[in-house]
Image (spheres, rainbow, N blue to C red):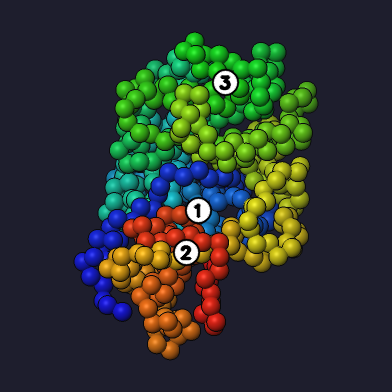
Amino acid sequence: MAPASLLVLLFLATLSPFPNVSAVGVNYGTLGNNLPSPKKVAQLLQSTLIDKVKIYDTNPEILGAFSNTGIDLIVAVENYHVANISTDTSAADEWLTNRVVPFIPATSIVAIAVGNEYLTTDPDHLKPNALIQAMQNLHAVLVQRGLDRKIKVTTPHSMAVLASSFPPSASTFATTLMPVMTSIVGFLADTGAPFMVNAYPYFAYRDNPGMVDLEYALLGNASGVRDPKGYVYSNMLDAQVDAVRSAIIALGFGNRTVEMTISESGWPSKGESGDDAATPENAKTYNTRLIERAQSNKGTPMSPKKNIEIFVFALFNENKKEGGVSERNFGMFNGDGSKVYEVDLSCQFCSSNGGTLGFGEKMSSGVRGPSVWCVAKPHADEKVLQAVLDFCCGPGGVDCREIYESGDCFAPDKLHAHASYAMNVYYQIHGRNYWNCDFKGTGLVTFSDPSYGTCKYSQQ
């Protein structure tokens, strides 16, 4: 095999690790004293359609548990750390060095959420400008380390950042937040990070049951709510997302690309006495439809072609969480691992070997996701394939001993065969995302096992 060359370096520079794709994500909170271990959680989620997990800190046990799982993680800077990181880049670098760097690349960390609903949680004590300064400092440190294309920096907002959310087309940000929101949206547009919003139709219905149709809140096919500009909304969640879009446009960013992510949305299975909305039946209906919505690749009435990434809130009921009864009952699972209600998280093509979904039950020993492999296209350019092979066996971190002369995959001693083996290993260890099998257009994802004789192509 030829040594790495300028072509390899140019090839490496063109890899894009953070494309715009739809995903089903889940929020994994840990404010409970009866929750399964992070290792069990990671094992379970590998056998589900969940491919992204958002956490609320940088818990090292969780980050370690999700290494080499193919599941992307979004980690967080807690609200009380924001001010410190906002002071200068050295503080941001120290945070990143201690909290994130030890776990990458084995753990696929794709974003850092700076704070959570920071601007509306405690406006009397938390300084708005500290948020954007902390975001800028973390991004600067990521740029210095060459990690800014892999790890994006953003911040989740509550709907309270809006002056009003209806009608969606006329929505704007609260006047007092206009300056900082302008800076934040500009930062997101410049860096390619998504705008995150925590959107809960449940609260709107609970507080105004006489004004809001239940099916409209539950993402059902309601008769439709018409916006003055002609948009028709069959569910409240789409209206909430478009309200945020309008607020962004009102700031003057209509010609800039700012992707939207629903960083939290869910429905509780239990609430205070008299809360008729918080029931297991409603929670099942909402989250089932939310997951279907996440997989649908559909946009909203205002932007029908723009997919929205969605993170379900939440994985667990958290018995130590502050607030009312409903706050502790948003989980799809109880602390003991049993399901609160039936919701289908199964992956259609996952290899489960008979395993069932449940923390106290048999874990799947199969790999996460479809049984798929990555191989070189039959007529791929050999110069590019050689660069791909050099990259995979060098900077790409692939163990290529199997295609050396004494290895099981050395024969046939052909560039196409050796490149296919290396490309597949790279594809498997980096998460089996479609962009991990692009290789400048020379890679092909296949459902047919390319193994032959004693040469075995890995699945994970």
Judging by the rendered image, the residue that carries numbered circle 2 is: 374
- Distance from Cα at disc 3 to Cα at disc 1: 31 Å
Q: Nearer the viewer, residue 414 or 426?
A: 414
User: Residue sitting at 45 percent across and 66 percent down?
Assistant: 375
Which amino acid type is shown beneath numbered disc 2?
A: Cys
* Quarter of the N terminus within the rendering: bottom left
Quadrant assignment, res 271 = top right
What is the secondary structure assignment of the residue under circle 2? strand
* Residue 328 can be seen, yes or no: no
Q: What residue did someone put label 3 on? A: 233
Mark 2 or mark 3, which has the lower sequence index?
3
Q: Are marks 3 and 1 in contact (CB under 8 Å)?
A: no
Res 175 quadrant in image: top left
Q: Nearer the viewer, mark 2 or mark 3?
A: 2
Q: Residue at x 35, y 75 (%)?
A: 415
Q: Position of residue 121 (x, y in %)?
A: 50, 30
* Residue that appears at 27% across and 54% down: 144
Which residue bears the numbered disc 1? 72
Q: Residues within 10 Å of mark 3 (few under 14, many from 20)?
A: many
376 versus 265 height, above or below = below
* SS class, disc 3: strand
Mark in the foreground, 3 or 1: 3
Counting every numbered tag in the picture gives: 3
| Residue type of the residue flagged with mark 1 | Asp
Q: Nearer the viewer, residue 326 or 121?
A: 326
Q: Nearer the viewer, residue 184 or 99?
A: 184
Residue 192 in picture, x, y percent from top left: 35, 41
Tell me the CA gap for discs 2 and 3: 41 Å
Whichever of labels 1 and 2 marks the residue nearer the N terminus, that label is 1
